[in-house]
Image: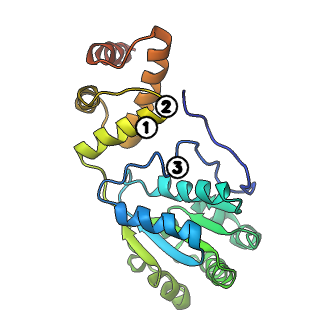
């Protein structure tokens, strides 16, 4: 029942390894329903450009990977890139994406001001638009918050569909934990989820990591995820 580490089906070798758990089904939208609906529609319909921005933990990286997963399930070529991969040799990286239907670029604000990267990104924007592809970018802030040196690129990015992602509130984190638990085949009562939230690191990454530990522990002990069981595990973790 434990989630795996990812697949490469239809994913180009230079892309990030997609996490199995980073899917639309595993994403708790909270107040981000409009962004989720737009992404669902664009995977199916084609040509467009989107920009997701928000604080760390708002789900932007998850959604980039979810779009790639969904595209590959439809038999489309998709790739998720990090700024490190692009900045290292932008021409070599971005010129080989002609067969991609979906290109996702995470933390792209870090590339602003690097002329060779901006030129390659501009050409990628145009190429995807010509062949009806989807370009999806994510960053800490809105497109024009960055000092793009290439005016034509800034114009392209400003014309993208822009969505600000809001982090989940406490109720949303409880719902997210329960959603992830269901995908693992676990029953996580609301009271237990709220207990976890009150005792553990509240970042989504930490909460989902803890859920993975609870999955293994409950399977090993053949126990349900009750508050006493979770409390015991947290005490053991704290003692290490």
Q: Is residue 108 left or right of residue 32?
A: right
Kindly identify which residue carries mark 2: 184
Residue 9 drawn above or below residue 181? below
Q: Residue at x 49, y 52 (%)?
A: 24
Query: Which of the two labelled residues, at mark 1 and mark 3, occupies the earlier sequence position?
Result: 3
Q: Is residue 64 left or right of residue 120?
A: left
Q: Quadrant of the C terminus?
A: top left
Q: Is residue 140 visible?
A: no
Numbered badge on residue 23: 3
> How many neighbours does mark 2 have within 10 angstroms: few (below 14), some (14-19), or many (20 or more)?
some
Cα distance between the residues tagged 2 and 1: 6 Å
Query: Which of the two labelled residues, at mark 3 and mark 2, occupies the earlier sequence position?
Result: 3
> How many neighbours does mark 3 have within 10 angstroms: few (below 14), some (14-19), or many (20 or more)?
some
Numbered badge on residue 180: 1
Which residue is outermost to the top?
221
Q: Where does the image place residue 159, in percent across and percent down from the top left?
A: 46, 85
Q: Are circles 2 and 1 on residues that touch, CB within 8 Å?
A: yes
């Amino acid at each position: 029942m434990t989630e795996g580490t990812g697949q490469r089906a239809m994913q180009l070798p230079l892309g990030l390894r997609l996490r199995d758990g980073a899917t639309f089904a595993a994403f708790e939208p909270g107040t981000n329903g409009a962004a989720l609906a737009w992404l669902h529609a664009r995977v199916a319909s084609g040509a467009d450009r989107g920009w997701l921005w928000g604080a760390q933990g708002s789900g932007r990286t998850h959604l980039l990977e979810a779009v790639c997963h969904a595209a590959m399930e439809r038999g489309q070529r998709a790739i998720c890139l990090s700024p490190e991969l692009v900045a290292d040799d932008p021409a070599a990286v971005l010129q080989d994406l002609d067969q991609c239907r979906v290109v996702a670029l995470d933390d792209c604000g870090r590339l602003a001001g690097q002329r060779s990267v901006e030129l390659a990104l501009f050409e990628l924007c145009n190429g995807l638009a010509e062949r009806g592809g989807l370009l999806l970018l994510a960053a800490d802030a809105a497109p024009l918050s960055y000092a793009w040196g290439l005016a034509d690129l800034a114009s392209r990015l400003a014309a993208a569909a822009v969505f600000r992602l809001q982090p989940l509130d406490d109720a949303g984190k409880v719902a997210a934990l329960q959603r992830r638990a269901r995908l693992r085949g676990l029953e996580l009562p609301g009271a237990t989820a709220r207990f976890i939230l009150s005792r553990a690191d509240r970042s989504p990454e930490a909460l989902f990591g803890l859920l993975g530990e609870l999955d293994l522990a409950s399977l090993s002990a053949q126990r349900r995820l009750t508050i006493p069981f979770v409390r015991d595990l947290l005490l053991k973790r704290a003692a290490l």
